[in-house]
């Protein structure tokens, strides 16, 4: 195995894989090191909303064929409250921009296939991954694969190893400021073998708590319901899940999600987190390693894509022109986009969920929030431009 590369990428989630491919397209050498196996990375059930900019990026990278065939383009969505669904025309409000439903696992699968086709290294099942000399011009990564130990020297390390990875904790205490907010609730999510009952997503405010109707394909519905942060999944039988989802999503016009066998269920924690700066020496953090948003605004995967798009351009500028301008601006520009997404995700979360300390006043105010949003073209435009995502810059 090579022991030298230009960019060592830690983590083969969306951030690491998109970065590896963007660097490949610019002729920059990388090695991707992942501590789980390929099946785990593909089959982890995660989010599934791609912003317009992320879809465009997949096409520009030449990995958009299956996305174009199987992705579900949505030009609008619904917000429901008090038994009424209100439509928001995302495309009409944003000059034709839209979102596409395509599971993160599908994105990752396409990118792994593309990586393998390039012949560049991608190591799954690496253990004892650690980063060294990150504040020097000669950083390195140590890891074990198949019982062999490796030391990889490189010019840069991209920390794309998610929230629980090794890269961020390798930055000395004091060099990083962490901003964090936790929520008193989480999401219980299911995948069900049931045709989507609506062609577009439905976000619902309800006295019992938030619920979301989404989908993965014409045969599979994805649904979420707000639960306690410390919820015990074993207390949720399939019958209880369905009756709660239907109670929270059903509208007066008789609409409700179709039911069917539950294929998968799990609980996702909610957190807002930002690491500042997104860089230390020659270690650059991207994606969940640098920031976490609550899933309400569907921004996590898209923020990761924006980070590595910017990082790939900065690295190309360094190798092609010897300029560090893009690298020097990486953190500041990334934080600007991150805080914009944080604000939007927090705002949507607060508007739609029932907090543990909520009073009847809070619930009435939430309904007023949604009713104002869906009655004002200015408010809907602001919502839509954030939801479909600002262009990459
Ligand atoms: N060494 C190598 N790889 C690691 C290590 C480690 N010590 N720790 C974690 N990883 C791997 C994980 O197994 C995972 O495959 O890094 C990858 C990180 O991927 P994600 O957690 O998916 O994070 P990211 O690529 O930033 O994707 C953005 O957007 O939809 C949201 O949270 C969702 O994962 C999604 C994220
Ligand atoms: C999803 O389909 O998984 C999904 C959709 C919208 C969100 C979050 C998740 O806001």
Image (cartoon, rainbow, N blue to C red):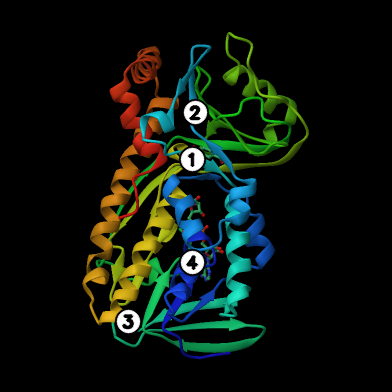
Question: Are dots 2 and 1 in contact, CB under 8 Å?
Answer: yes
Numbered badge on residue 16: 4
* Secondary-structure class at tag 4: helix
Q: Compute the Cα span from label 2 to label 4.
A: 30 Å
Q: Earlier in the sequence, mark 2 or mark 1?
A: 2
Quickly name the residue at label 3.
319
Q: Compute the Cα span from label 4 to label 3.
A: 19 Å
Q: Compute the Cα span from label 3 to label 1.
A: 34 Å
Could you tell me residue 255's position as x and y percent?
63, 16
Could you tell me residue 41's position as x and y percent?
62, 61
Question: Are dots 4 and 3 in contact, CB under 8 Å?
Answer: no
* Secondary-structure class at tag 3: helix
Q: Is residue 189 left or right of residue 330?
A: right
Inspect this view and state whether residue 232 appears.
no
Q: Residue furthest right?
A: 261
Question: Quadrant of the image for the C terminus?
Answer: bottom left
Q: Closer to us: mark 4 or mark 3? A: 3
């Amino acid at each position: 195995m090579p022991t030298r590369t230009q960019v060592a990428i830690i983590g083969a989630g969306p951030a690491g894989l998109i970065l590896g491919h963007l660097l490949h397209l610019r002729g920059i050498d990388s090695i991707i090191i992942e501590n789980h196996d390929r099946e785990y990375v593909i089959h982890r059930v995660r989010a599934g909303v791609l912003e317009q900019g992320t879809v465009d990026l997949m096409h520009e990278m030449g990995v958009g064929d299956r996305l174009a065939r199987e992705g579900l383009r949505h030009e609008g969505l619904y917000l429901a409250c008090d038994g009424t669904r209100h439509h928001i025309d995302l495309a009409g409000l944003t000059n034709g921009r839209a979102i596409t439903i395509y599971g993160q696992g599908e994105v990752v699968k396409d990118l792994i296939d593309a990586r393998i086709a390039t012949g560049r290294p991608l190591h799954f099942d690496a253990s004892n991954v650690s980063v060294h000399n990150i504040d020097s011009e000669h950083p390195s990564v140590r890891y074990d694969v198949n019982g062999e130990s490796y030391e990889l020297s490189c010019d840069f390390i991209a920390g794309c190893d998610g929230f629980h990875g090794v890269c961020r904790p390798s930055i000395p205490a004091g060099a990083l400021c962490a901003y964090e907010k936790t929520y008193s609730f989480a999401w219980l999510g299911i995948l069900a073998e049931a045709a989507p009952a609506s062609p577009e997503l439905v976000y619902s405010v309800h006295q019992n708590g938030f619920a979301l109707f989404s989908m993965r394909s014409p045969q599979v519905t994805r649904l979420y319901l707000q639960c306690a942060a410390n919820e015990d999944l074993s207390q949720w039988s399939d019958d209880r899940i369905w009756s709660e989802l239907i109670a929270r999503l059903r509208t007066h016009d008789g609409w409700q999600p179709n039911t069917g066998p539950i294929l998968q269920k799990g609980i996702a924690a909610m957190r807002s987190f930002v690491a500042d700066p997104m860089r230390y020496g020659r270690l650059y953090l991207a994606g969940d390693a640098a920031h976490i948003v609550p899933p309400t605004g569907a921004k996590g995967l898209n923020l990761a894509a924006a980070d590595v798009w910017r990082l790939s351009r900065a690295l190309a500028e360094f190798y092609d022109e010897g300029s560090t301008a893009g690298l020097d601006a990486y953190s500041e520009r990334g934080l600007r986009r991150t805080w914009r997404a944080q604000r939007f995700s927090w705002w949507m979360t607060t508007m739609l969920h029932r907090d543990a300390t909520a009073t009847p006043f809070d619930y009435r105010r939430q309904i007023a929030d949604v009713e104002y949003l869906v009655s004002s073209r200015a408010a809907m435009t602001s919502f839509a431009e954030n939801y479909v995502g600002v262009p990459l810059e």
